[in-house]
Amino acid sequence: MGTIEQRGGSWRIGVQVYDENGKRKWIRRTLKLNGALSESQQRRQAEKALKQLEVDAENGKARAESAMTLKDLADLWMRRHVRANCSPVTASNYQHLLDRRILPKLGAIQVDKLTPARLADFMVEIREEGRVSQQRDDADLARKRTPSDRARLAKDPAAPLSARTLCSYYDCLYQMFEKAVRWEVLWRNPMAAVDRPRFRAKPVHYLDDDQAVELLRALQGEKDMSFRCAVLLALTCGLRLGEVGGLTWADVNWKRCAIDVSKAAKYASGSGSFVGPTKTPSSDRTVTLPAGMMALLDETHKHQQEVAALLGDRWRGQDRIVCAWDGTPLHHDTPSKQFRRFADRHGFEGVRFHDLRHTHATLLFASNIDAVAVASRLGHAKADTTLRIYAHALKRRDEDSAAAMQTILDRVDAAPDDEHVN
């Protein structure tokens, strides 16, 4: 049988249940009712809520209040699920989101008291807080920033968080509460009643064929052959940054003029740099290389062998194609930073290393390569993913289609004898 207590301006309802060990426990809820209602009206609403609580308790949808805080749940989630099943990079990203804003604001609250309304307020709160750069006060890093970096950080630091970043916070909380429901810590996921932020993906940034040729001409003046390999592998093969960094000479098939892509250089806070699997299973692929790329690889391989012979014991090579002068593997983001400095010097401000991959796909579509072939080269599981990302590249083909139809229309207007003139 349930109980109803009036406690000042609120009402407290409760029902006793037995746990799996036969011990009695109370399930209690505090109700804040409309103060304009009479006491008898409030009591009737409390009785109605009590009946619902009794039904929920019987169906397993209501449980005794838990002392578990969100921080307790986060620690359990990270230990039991994330670190056991996710990649180190994913685990690092989740931990960053928790430490950055979620736990400082919500960590001390009991999980069964985190209502959808409170979580919706949290999403609004962090959005209005604005962006915070961890590197803003680092004078040493400030001296190393490229013009592109400075332009990016010159934005108003009080500007709202991007919708994409908000989605990351939303997804972290949603996934954590979803596991709590499965573990029967909660009977429902409170984030399910909170609207997920909407965002539009930014348009793909790419170079046209003339700009690509201009960039490659500028690249010929670079003495760092490892850097030249990194840029060409992205531009002529569509490789991702991590895939470029993870390549070894053993991955090159010199006879078939192809390269095997099956791993990627990565970085995770706490783990440091490491080589792991590619982004998705479909990202494992064999990519045929153009003759110019093979020539550069051959030249770079011979150069590394010569340097290794000169350095002797000081050579730290691990068979990586893209590496430092002594063979040491580079940090996974180093080629990207090198490229930003190179791009700024040669008039390609704002062009990122990943834009080389976008350029590769766009140029293939412009050359009438079919979507399935482009998807296979990029490591996409489905061609419709490729078409969705590179829809802009189909506009030129649509114009070609219109020109083909105009050819038919021109034949209608032409005199019949004109078609047979030699």
Image (cartoon, grey):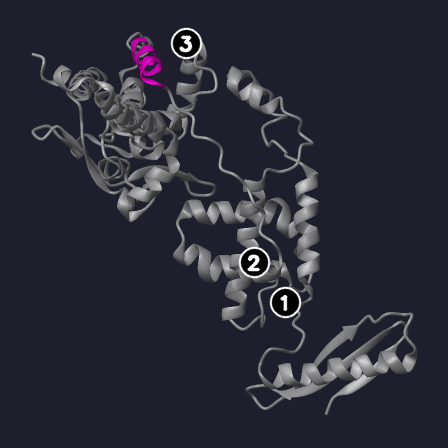
Other residues around mark 3 within 10 Å, as few (<14) / some (14–19) / many (≥20): few
Q: Could you tell me which secondary element the residue under label 1 belongs to?
A: loop
Q: Amino acid at mark 1?
A: Met
Place of residue 301 in the rendered image (x, y in percent of width and height, measured from the top left): 18, 21
Q: Are marks 2 and 3 in contact (CB under 8 Å)?
A: no
Tag nearer the camera, 2 or 3: 3
Place of residue 57 in the rendered image (x, y in percent of width and height, measured from the top left): 63, 83
Which residue is at the front of the view, 31 or 64?
A: 31
Magenta stretch: dominant secondary structure: helix
Q: Are marks 1 and 2 in contact (CB under 8 Å)?
A: no
Give the extent of the magenta segment.
208-217
Q: Counting residues from the N terminus, which is met first, the one under dot 1 or under dot 2?
A: 1
Residue at which label 1 appears: 68
Q: Counting residues from the N terminus, which is met first, the one under dot 2 or under dot 3?
A: 2
Q: Residue at x 20, y 15 (%)?
A: 310
Image-based side of 16 in relation to 417, left or right: right
Place of residue 19 in the rendered image (x, y in percent of width and height, measured from the top left): 59, 86
Q: Residue at x 54, y 66 (%)?
A: 180
Residue at which label 3 appears: 346
Image-based side of 150 in relation to 365, left or right: right
Q: Is 53 inside the magenta-drawn segment?
A: no
Disc 3 and disc 1: Cα gap in Å? 56 Å
Q: Image quadrant for the N terminus? A: bottom right
* Residue found farthest to the top: 221
Residue at which label 2 appears: 74
Place of residue 71 in the rendered image (x, y in percent of width and height, measured from the top left): 61, 58
Tag nearer the camera, 3 or 1: 3
Residue 268 drawn above or below residue 207: below
